């Protein structure tokens, strides 16, 4: 285990012990600051460093979100980490939905999911997921980055209205939230590798924030959202019939 900052604050030992039987070679690293945990694990992947790792940053100076956006998380105000895993699912479809579902189920009954990658609470964004992949020899290496708002900074002028875990979990801290979500998340990822998204479809749809809403996509699709299929594609009933949206390049907004 490689712990480089505030080792006593983070529950690295407990997480490591619970996870290592299923992920041999697993390590946990805690960095006081880095540009982006996803960027760092992708850099390592290019150097053929492909061991399973949980990389936590207490602060990111260049956090990245989906669709080329920046992701801002202030010190102590957000939990920011990435998992780097040698990963060979039969089918990658729905992976980000599976990750979101695991996080939502760990955090509470009123956490919803906004397809494909956002955690929502009361119509506001609680967190996001950025998944990237690199090839390793004949296989692949997944970098699964997660950012969760623990508290909202005083001047919260984010483009998207934001929610925070401290609103429903008094005294929530970044280490306590990590301790709650890490093991279930790694269990979900293990299950997804062999079984894919299918077994999770029903549970996702129960938390789908867009289901039953009129939505509009950034590539011009308009219609009624009917949940996701067993591959995690968003089902939209449009004037031209039902369409399945599966591109992660698309953003979706309720109308
Ligand atoms: C999004 O909402 O668009 C995705 C946000 C993902 C943010 C996390 S924070 C940890 C990891 N490192 C990054 O640079 N991004 C992800």
Image (cartoon, helix red, strand yellow):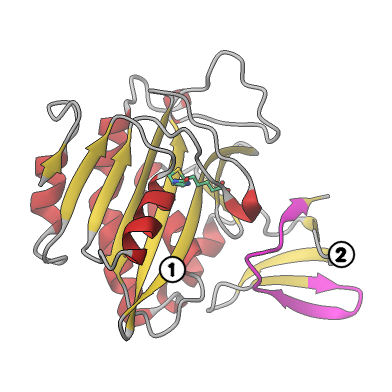
Name the element at disc 1.
strand
Looking at this view, is 249 or 253 the one in front?
249
Depth order, front residue of 141/254: 141
Any part of residue 153 in sight: yes
Compared to 199, does 158 lie above or below?
above
Q: Residue 49 appears at what percent x and percent y?
A: 25, 64
Magenta span contains residue 239: yes
Q: Residue at x 72, y 59 (%)?
A: 212
Residue 138 sits in which quadrant?
A: bottom left
Q: Residue at x 80, y 72 (%)?
A: 237
Q: Where is residue 130 shown, x and y percent of the image? A: 50, 54
Q: Is residue 184 left or right of residue 68?
A: left
Question: What label does residue 220 carry, if any?
Answer: 2
- Magenta-colored span: 237-253
Q: Residue at x 30, y 64 (%)?
A: 47
Magenta span contains residue 152: no
């Amino acid at each position: 285990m490689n712990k480089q900052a505030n080792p006593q604050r983070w529950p690295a030992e407990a997480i490591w012990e619970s996870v290592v039987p299923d992920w041999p070679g697993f390590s946990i690293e805690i960095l006081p600051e880095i540009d982006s945990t996803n960027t760092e694990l992708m850099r390592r992947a290019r150097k053929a460093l492909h061991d399973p790792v949980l990389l936590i940053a207490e602060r990111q100076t260049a956090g990245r979100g989906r669709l080329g956006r920046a992701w801002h998380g202030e010190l102590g105000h957000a939990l920011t980490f990435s998992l780097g895993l040698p990963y060979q699912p039969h089918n990658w479809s729905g992976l980000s939905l599976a990750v979101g579902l695991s996080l939502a189920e760990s955090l509470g009954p009123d956490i919803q999911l906004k397809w494909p990658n956002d955690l929502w609470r009361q119509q506001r964004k609680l967190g996001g997921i950025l998944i990237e992949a690199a090839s390793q020899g004949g296989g692949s290496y997944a970098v699964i980055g997660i950012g969760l708002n623990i508290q909202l900074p005083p001047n919260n002028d984010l483009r998207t209205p934001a929610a925070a875990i401290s609103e429903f979990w008094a005294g929530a801290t970044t280490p306590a939230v990590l301790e709650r979500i890490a093991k279930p998340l790694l269990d979900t990822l293990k299950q997804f590798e062999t079984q894919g998204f299918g077994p999770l479809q029903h549970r996702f749809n129960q938390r789908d924030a867009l289901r039953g809403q009129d939505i509009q996509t950034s590539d011009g699709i308009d219609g009624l959202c009917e949940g996701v299929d067993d591959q995690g594609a968003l089902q939209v009933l449009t004037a031209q019939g039902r369409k399945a949206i599966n591109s992660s390049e698309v953003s979706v907004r309720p109308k």
